[in-house]
Amino acid sequence: MFNTLKKMITELGFTTVKSIPKESVIATHRVVDYSPENNSRFKLKQNQSYPRDVNCSTCSHQVVMSNWTYDQYSKMKVKVRVVCFRCLPNIVDKEGNPRNIVASPNSEMRKDWETFIEETDKHTT
Ligand SMILES: [Zn+2]
């Protein structure tokens, strides 16, 4: 369905948000799919991701979250749904495009993230 992360993100239309809305889905990598060296591809520390005490709501694998996202997520009293990038296409198939997939809070962080996604696709496809 989506042969690259970049395509998935472009087609699903990830949003830029100042804070994580209640009705959103956080899409991220499984820990097993994310090597710590990936962080060197980010210019911004807020975008660097680490394993967290959080699991994908679908496959239950532990996930990584960026410093910014995890900071927001850990402050939420009612947690939003977390889905790994492997499960996301199935969710889109079954439920349609989830609204408010969280990307980043501003254009600078978003650009940094998009560059990262392009680089990741180059390394994995
Ligand atoms: Zn999953």
Image (tube, rainbow, N blue to C red):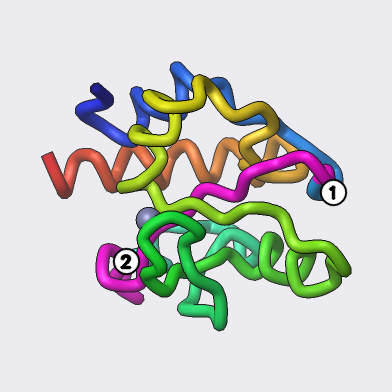
Q: In this view, does 120 lie to the left or right of 100?
A: left
Q: Per the image, is 39 magenta?
A: no
Most distant residue in the left direction: 125
Q: In x, y percent, where is residue 49? A: 50, 68
Q: Which amino acid does label 1 sit on?
A: Ser
Give the image quadrant in which the ligand numbered 1 is located.
bottom left
Q: Residue at x 35, y 72 (%)?
A: 31
**Quarter of the rendering containing residue 72:** bottom right
Q: Looking at the image, which residue sits at the far front?
A: 94
Is the N terminus in the top left, top right, bottom left or bottom right quadrant?
top left
Residue drawn at (70%, 34%) of the image? 107
Name the residue carrying label 1: 19
Q: Give percent across and percent down for residue 109.
A: 65, 46
- Name the one closer to the observer, 37 or 73: 73
Local secondary structure at mark 1:
loop
Amino acid type, mark 2? Tyr
Q: Is residue 11 above or below residue 37?
A: above
Element class at badge 2? loop
At a point 58% along the width and 64% down the height, the residue shown is 66
First in sequence, mark 2 or 1: give its number. Answer: 1
Q: Does the magenta stretch include residue 30?
A: yes
Q: Which residue corresponds to mark 2?
A: 34
